[in-house]
Image (spheres, coloured by chain):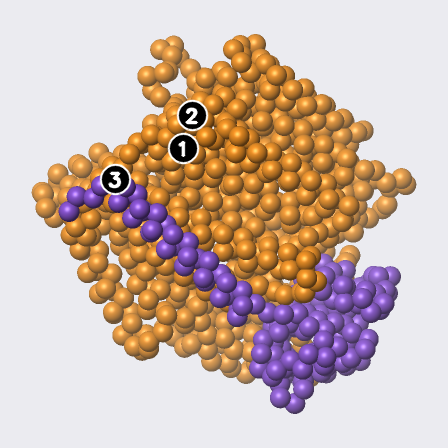
Amino acid sequence: MSIELGHFALILAFALACVSTVVGYAFWRGAGRTTQFVQQAAVMQFLLIAAAFAALVYAFVTSDFSLKLAYDNSHSLQPLIYKITGVWGNHEGSVLLWILILVGFGAAVAMFGRNLPKELLTLVLATQSLLVAAFSGFALFTSNAFLRLDPPPMEGHDLNPILQDIGLAIHPPLLYTGYVGFSICFSFAIAALISGRIDAAWARWVRPWTLLSWCFLTLGIAMGSYWAYYELGWGGWWFWDPVENASFMPWLAGTALLHSALVMEKRNALKIWTIFLSIITFSLSLLGTFLVRSGVLTSVHTFASDPTRGMVILALLAAFIGGAFILFALRASSLRTGGLFAPISREGALILNNLFLATGLAAVLIGTLYPLLLDAIAGKTISVGAPFFNLTFGTLMAPLLVLIPFGPFLAWKRGDLVAVVQRLGGAVAVTLLVTLVVFILSGAQFSLAPLGLLLGFWVGFGAIAELVDRIKLGRIAPLESWNRLKGLPRTAFSTALAHFGMGFTVIGIVATSAWQGELITTMAPGQTAQLSGYSVVFNGTTDAGGPNYDAQRASFTITDPHGGVRQSAAERRTFTASRQQTTEADIQTYGLSQLYLQLGEAGDGNTSVVRLWYKPFVTMIWLGAVIMALGGFLSLSDRRLRVGAPKRKARQPMAEPAE
Amino acid sequence: MAMTRKQKRLGVIAGLGAVLALAVGLILFALRDQIVFFYSPSDVHAHQVAAGHPIRLGGLVKAGSWIKTGQNNSFTVTDGTAEISAHFNGILPDLFREGQGVVAEGAMAPDGSFVASNVLAKHDENYIPKEVVDELKKRGEWKPQQQAAGAM
């Protein structure tokens, strides 16, 4: 019964979104009651989709296998958490989660956007409704999650074992929140193009949404990378796989958008480019979510896909992306640009940032789509792998990393490069010194590693140098510096934090790639393996099990270079329902580094194949991403930029409900 | 040294152009030299793939061909017409089975066997790399039902 109610709620939301789109677009001019209607419709869509989603979750939790989706992706013995996450561990459910987040953002704009001009708000919500209508229609007609089975089976098929992990509870919701949040930027861009009104205030309204989405996308990608690292058991954290690229491209575009929106907000320049980026970013998000499902790409992340859906998805993508760009082509020339500036200025630095990010993005896009095109046109099958991306993307990002520390030091309109170089002198000295020390300690071998480290340290110390410079540390009394530090706006810290996180990640990437140790060996119980100063004793394997799987567990005793001893265990699991096997790697964290143990097949006698990796400073890769996201959240908490409070003077004197 | 506005603008455009040219050059160079072609065993024989050149080899793991000594695996990749024996030192993916599709990255050795540096793993037990499916379809060897039975 509740399943039919959920289905009905989805149909209602679809109908309401259609009405809201038509009404919004038809009567946006001089909107008064139209605005009220689309606002209420946005909240209503959220409640309806939430109800539909709750119906699915309920069916999964109660193991109601008359629901086909639950039968295919759940099992009564699964732990509760995997019953819930199983809802979106499949195509139909994940589409519904995507729509749920979409309507969530729509409702948030409707509720917090009361200070927006009515016409703009109406157009934004109409565009959101159009997206809801399109994708809930897609869910209803091609990917219905609410199909029933009659008679209901006694037991389900089990969730794909690789997905039975806490990662599934965290990664997709974070990633989708990031993807879908950019729909708000998209809708604002479309609204600006239709109404023809765009100014610095527009950028101020859009920025919090961009920032919020960017933070979630950063965390989502980092979480996905860590999940693949520990679950897939290949010891790698990034494979330049098409689906990873699909999530990385909106991140690159979103990062560029954050920076160009800054120029628009502060200097009323780069308007057309910012609008263009808003459209591109969400288009890439759509590509990221749905190209993966269309069956065009094959990758570790794709759900088994149905080719008939693929055409619908591609048609929807073409309609939204194509439509937006046609509108852009027709209307962009009517937008006036303003704000002149010299090439060497904060604006100039931000343009360079955008240039390198955009070309890097183009390289990733070409590398991802070229095999598809070549296959379609010439019938040749190729794979574009890590060597391509490392060469093109890596080379394009290196100058960007060199430039990052300069940006925040340059003044708006006209900067003085000589003065900036002088103020960065301290950071240059510290960077060179630290890199030299690491270079000598690591055996003074010439390779790309010291250069990469130089870049990482430069970005990291450059970010700190900006704060040091702003509080005049060492040039004035310490107490006064402290007072200056307390007086700095939060955005100053957030910029420094985000840039510092970038440097942190770069150092992690370089160190892991350069100094990782790897060993594959066959071990008998009692044997010892040596790797990068760690000695690992294999203690043999035992049988173990969990609620829905049997396992073979190998235990190890690890002695680290400082003499510390740890016990650890890696497993190979065989799932009862599907007979699938997974390997559970054992990962021991030592400071920022990790020792990674993977158990292979059993050999003759009591021997087992064991694979060991030593991953120096590998955790810095993900910690850096977390630091970047923290920087973003800190900026969001800044009063002047808070969602719904675009201008303090625009606030009503009367009390407003707490946000 | 005061520049006119026109000179400044030319300078900016030249700078942008230089970065774009760098990007285009890099991409073209990388597309020529850094991509890996996919071969079936028949293709390998037909094209005389040079030893040591990185390729992807795809096909089915021939039934009864998988021999394992410690971490050293050898198996035969077949597409129904031609066969190539492959060697892999390491841990095979969980879904590696005889009779199933496989894609291996590596290079041909001078003796005509294939040395894999990486064997690709996929999520789904019914998953067969698209390249392998296309190849098998082309040769009329594609039997989906056999595949499904093999996965049970």
Amino acid type of the residue tagged 3 in the rendering: Arg
Q: Position of residue A441 (x, y in %)?
A: 29, 74
Residue at the disc numbered 3: B5
Residue at the disc numbered 2: A198
Amino acid type of the residue tagged 2 in the rendering: Ile
Amino acid type of the residue tagged 1 in the rendering: Lys
Residue at x 57%, y 56% (from the top left corner)? A368
Name the residue nearer the viewer: A549 or A285: A285
Measure the C-alpha gap from mark 1 to mark 2. 8 Å
Q: Chain of mark 1?
A: A
Name the residue nearer the viewer: A212 or B109: B109
Q: Position of residue A35 (x, y in %)?
A: 55, 15
State which chain is coloured orange: A
* Residue A309: image tag: none
Name the side, left or right, on which A239 lies relative to A157. Answer: left
Please say if the residues under marks 1 and 3 sit with CB atoms less than 8 Å apart: no
Q: Chain of mark 2?
A: A
Please name which of the two marks, 1 or 3, marks the residue nearer to the observer.
3
| Numbered disc 1: secondary structure | helix
Of mark 1 and mark 2, the one earlier in the sequence is 2
Residue at x 66%, y 70% (from the top left corner)? B38
Measure the C-alpha gap from mark 1 to mark 3. 21 Å
State which chain is coloured purple: B
